Image (cartoon, rainbow, N blue to C red):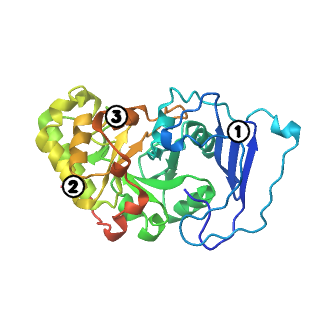
Amino acid sequence: RSLAKDGEWFDFEITVRGQNIMVCIGGTEVVCYTEPEHPYRTEEHARQLLSQGSIALQGIHGEVSFRNLAIERLAKEARNEADTLAPTDERTDGIIRLQQRDFPVIDYHVHLKGGLTKEMAHAMSMNYGINYGVAPNAGEGGVGRMLADDKEVYDYFNEVKGLPFLCGVQGEGRKWTTTFSQESLGIFDYLFTDAMTIIDHKGRNSRIYRAEEALFDDITLEQYMNHLVDQTVLILTNEPADIYANPTFLPDTMAHDYDKYWTDERIERVLDVLQQHGIALEINARYRIPSFEIIRRAKARGIKFTFGTNNVDADFGRLEYCAEAIKQCGLTADDIWFPSMSTRRSRPIVIYNRFE
């Protein structure tokens, strides 16, 4: 996420100490990279190594202006300071291999909870080479940072707007569309939601990730699954989400028979609504869903994908399942969704109080 605005001057600082290179925009670190002894480079990027040479200023698109340009040679002591970030073994690192293929690696589903602060997330993002989209929950019934009204939306946004994160928000519960104005939600780069909170077959609010709320009384598991799919379609049809998160999640009682319950007909119903409304399908690293078969079907329809974790703490890995899905399902950079593809601003928020 760019911290510089078009038409406004900003400070741009590059510092090289030893094999470490750091880039700051307006005083905020956006890159901190230490080149290892054996860096991994594709043929296209083979020359992108720290060495020596000339300096050039180049604007790729439009008009770019520079002023107050200065180059300072660091004192020998400063040049020999220990690197501020330990190098990664790029010969085995999957993320650097994706980056070298110019494949966008973005985790859109990071929450500041379980001890994870925005400062920690900032450092982890640079360390892992993964761009983060940081999102609070908005509505009711979730865990971690919750936004309750428009004022809290703007207060939160002012806290994070100076950090190089994409700024998202997760709609929580089924009343969030009536809680916030379209103007307040419009300041975020993207919105996402899931079907982990539904109105069950008896009209009860049910968080299906909690065993005590995923109740199957007076109904078979097949009937419950049909109702869950109905709810998923209704949510994705009526809520202004860019991304379907935690997709195809099932309660613990059913999860071990995932392929049994996600039949062809049920898969197609969900993919239909994603395709109709231009909603991206999240590949979720925490739950390892959806299945590769569903990902392949979505790709064949031209549905776009995002990567997401839905972390519970600060130890949430490096999108391993997503990297596996890229390989197994033949995903390319053209299959990935970006906020510029959002269609939610052209979709009115539909207000409803209960699901039939």
Residue found at x 38% / y 48%: 333
Residue 55 drawn above or below residue 294: below
How far apart, in angstroms, are the residues tagged by discs 1 and 2?
A: 47 Å
Percent across and percent down for residue 1 are: 54, 56
Q: Which residue is mark 3?
A: 327
Displayed quadrant of residue 157: bottom right
Residue 84 in the figure: left or right of residue 301? right
Q: Earlier in the sequence, mark 2 or mark 3?
A: 2
Q: Where residue 180 is drawn, which disc sits there?
A: none
Of residue 223 and residue 58, the one placed in the foreground of this image is: 58
Percent across and percent down for residue 37 are: 64, 28
Tag 2: amino acid: Val
Q: Which residue is mark 1?
A: 20
Cβ–Cβ under 8 Å for marks 1 and 2: no
Mark 1 or mark 2, whichever is nearer to me: 1
Residue 281 drawn above or below residue 345: above
Percent across and percent down for residue 138 are: 45, 54
Q: Where residue 273 is drawn, which disc sits there?
A: 2
Can the viewer see residue 273 in this picture? yes
How far apart, in angstroms, are the residues tagged by discs 2 and 3?
A: 26 Å
SS for callout 2: helix
Displayed quadrant of residue 349: bottom left
Q: Earlier in the sequence, mark 1 or mark 3?
A: 1
Of residue 212 and residue 315, the one placed in the foreground of this image is: 315
Cβ–Cβ under 8 Å for marks 1 and 3: no
Callout count: 3
Mark 2 or mark 3, whichever is nearer to me: 3
Residue 20 in the figure: left or right of residue 192? right
Say which quadrant the C terminus sits in. Answer: bottom left
SS for callout 1: strand
Can the viewer see residue 210 in this picture? no
